[in-house]
Image: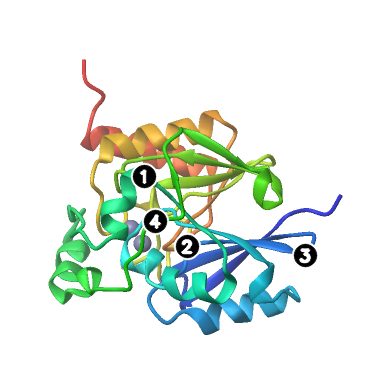
Amino acid sequence: MSRTVIETIPILPFGMVNSFLIAFEGKAILIDTGLPQSEPKILKALKKHSLVWSDVNAIVLTHAHIDHAGSAVAIKSLTSAPIIAHEMEIPYCQGERPTLNATGLFGRLFYKTGAILEPFPYFRPDVPIAQPKLNLSEYGFPMCTLHFTPGHTPGSLSVLFDDGRVIAGDLAASGILLGGIAFRKRPKRPPFEESAALVATSLEQLLALGARKFYIGHGGPLGAKTIDTHVHALRKISPLPG
Ligand SMILES: [Zn+2]
Ligand SMILES: [Zn+2]
């Protein structure tokens, strides 16, 4: 049986902002839609796998920050595919100002640019997820399961493959600044994180489920050992209670 392809879509170069196309037997699911006006980059990835817009069966959002949900409305109109997001993420999908706890100097400077708070076309997810996990077999991908992995935002989702690959949104990042040219293998926190403790718990949960290769929104991919190191660093910032 052919392996599911994970195609990284460079929304910005050098891994600064990534979306992902997963493709299997002529069908596709888009994981995150990038900043507004990312349609040409997504189309390029589809063409690379001889796919067209109508082959996209679903649009999954790891979360609803502008760099992940900015083109959701445009892609939905091109594909007619449903937008899948966690119900806890609905306020952000509808334009509520996200909680932005900067994790360091870059986050504070980035916040000042205002880019993260720019408006984008808002929407209501067609498939709001309330359960802790959902198999994507209904969309043609029986080897992929959505997991509720909160922390970066309240409704963050990850897509776990049977073979240990996982698309984990902004649960971790790597590189300098946003993604970046250097240090792509070195884990770090993304510029903003709502709860370091919840992120650590979500990453531990994915590791326990067998996640071995983490594809992320900024930088990456990162191996399980690197993620484990990152979890330990997060626990130092935010120890388990008790
Ligand atoms: Zn984010
Ligand atoms: Zn992001």
- Mark 3 surroundings within 10 Å by alpha-carbon count, few (fewer than 14), some (14 through 19), many (20 or more): few
Q: Which amino acid, by three-letter code, is at mark 1?
A: Glu
- Mark 4 surroundings within 10 Å by alpha-carbon count, few (fewer than 14), some (14 through 19), many (20 or more): many
Q: Nearer the viewer, mark 1 or mark 2?
A: 1
Q: Nearer the viewer, mark 1 or mark 3?
A: 1
**Residue placed under numbered mark 2 in the picture:** 32
**Residue placed under numbered mark 3 in the picture:** 26
Question: Dot 3 lies on which element?
Answer: loop
Mark 1 touches mark 4? (CB < 8 Å):
no
Residue 242 x, y percent position in the rendering = 21, 15
**CA separation in Å, label 1 and label 3:** 29 Å
- Residue lying at the far right in this picture: please name it: 1
The label shown at residue 195 is none
Residue 222 in sight here: yes
The answer to whether the beta carbon of the residue marked 4 is less than 8 Å from any atom of ligand 2 is: yes
Question: Dot 1 lies on which element?
Answer: helix
- Mark 1 surroundings within 10 Å by alpha-carbon count, few (fewer than 14), some (14 through 19), many (20 or more): some
Question: Dot 4 lies on which element?
Answer: strand
Residue plotted at (69% across, 79% down) = 47
The label shown at residue 173 is 4
Q: Which amino acid, by three-letter code, is at mark 2?
A: Asp
Q: Earlier in the sequence, mark 1 or mark 3?
A: 3
Q: Nearer the viewer, mark 3 or mark 4?
A: 3
Mark 3 touches mark 4? (CB < 8 Å):
no
